[in-house]
Image: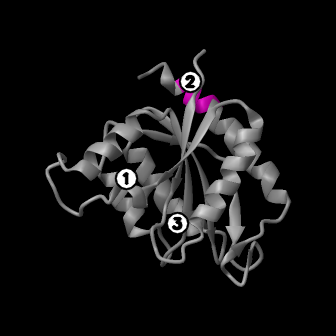
């Protein structure tokens, strides 16, 4: 079977964001596994316009990137009990590109980002993305020093690996449908 490519999507573009720290930590853990190609996909790099025809360079590049991926790991902060607006816009800026792929989710926030994940799961279902059950939750209070420097508890490594196991398994199975 061909090696799968999994995009680790950074779900925030705010100044001072910590999603890159979390995303690169997940990527480092994932790369040690050797079971897929993992890459960081930063929404900020695509400069998606709020409105458009779909022919704008940001939309075109975003679409091409999503089509090239077999699955996803979303790095999701909780903003106001939900996902960041930029992530919702990025999800809505594509459709068929998401279909029949799997996704893992790593979230963070005051209660681990759990409320954001509940919203994200509903959106992913509408896009025909199968989200996996295991969901590492990171506390902004205990896994971040001064709320800005990511220092995860060791227990999260096992949770990330289980989430990746599920994401790889589902991504492989769903690839047969595309």
* Residue 134 appears in the rendering: no
Q: Residue at x 41, y 53 (%)?
A: 123
Give residue 2's quadrant in the image. top right
Q: Which residue is drawn at 71% across and 40% down?
A: 31
Question: Do the residues under discs 2 and 3 have CB atoms within 8 angstroms?
Answer: no
Could you say where residue 23 lies in the image, as x and y percent from the top left? 62, 56
Give the foreground label among 2 and 1.
Answer: 1
What's the CA distance linking mark 1 and mark 3? 14 Å
Give the foreground label among 1 and 3.
Answer: 1
Looking at this rendering, what residue extends furthest in the left direction? 53
Q: Return the residue at label 3.
A: 116
Q: Badge 3 local density, few (<14 within 10 Å), some, or many (20+)?
A: many
Q: Element type at marker 3?
A: helix
The answer to which of marks 2 and 3 sits earlier in the sequence is 3
In the rendered image, the vertical position of residue 116 relative to residue 9, given as above or below:
below
In the rendered image, the vertical position of residue 68 relative to residue 154, given as above or below:
above
Q: Return the residue at label 2.
A: 173
Q: Badge 2 local density, few (<14 within 10 Å), some, or many (20+)?
A: few
The answer to which of marks 2 and 1 sits earlier in the sequence is 1
Looking at this rendering, what residue extends furthest in the right direction? 154
What's the CA distance linking mark 2 and mark 3? 27 Å
User: Which residues are drawn in magenta?
Assistant: 169-173
Q: Residue at x 54, y 71 (%)?
A: 78
Could you say where residue 11 lies in the image, as x and y percent from the top left? 49, 61
Q: Return the residue at label 1.
A: 91
Could you say where residue 72 lies in the image, as x and y percent from the top left? 53, 43
- Residue 170 part of the magenta-drawn span: yes
> Does residue 101 appear to the left or right of 18 in the view shown?
left
> Does residue 65 appear to the left or right of 121 in the view shown?
left
């Amino acid at each position: 079977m061909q090696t799968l490519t999994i995009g680790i999507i950074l779900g925030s573009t705010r100044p001072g964001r910590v999603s890159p720290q979390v995303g690169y930590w997940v990527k480092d853990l994932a790369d040690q596994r050797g079971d897929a190609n993992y890459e960081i996909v930063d929404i900020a790099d695509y400069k998606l316009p709020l409105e458009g025809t779909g022919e704008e360079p940001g939309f075109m590049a975003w679409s091409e990137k999503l089509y090239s991926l077999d699955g996803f790991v979303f790095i999701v902060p909780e903003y106001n009990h939900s996902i960041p607006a930029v992530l919702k816009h990025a999800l809505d800026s594509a459709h068929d590109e998401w279909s029949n792929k799997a996704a893992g989710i790593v979230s963070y926030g005051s209660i681990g980002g759990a409320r954001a994940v509940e919203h994200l799961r509903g959106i992913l279902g509408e896009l025909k993305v199968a989200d996996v059950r295991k969901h590492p939750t990171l506390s902004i209070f205990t896994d971040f020093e001064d709320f800005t420097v990511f220092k995860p508890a060791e227990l999260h490594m096992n949770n990330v690996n289980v989430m990746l196991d599920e994401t790889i398994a589902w991504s492989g199975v769903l690839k047969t449908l595309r």
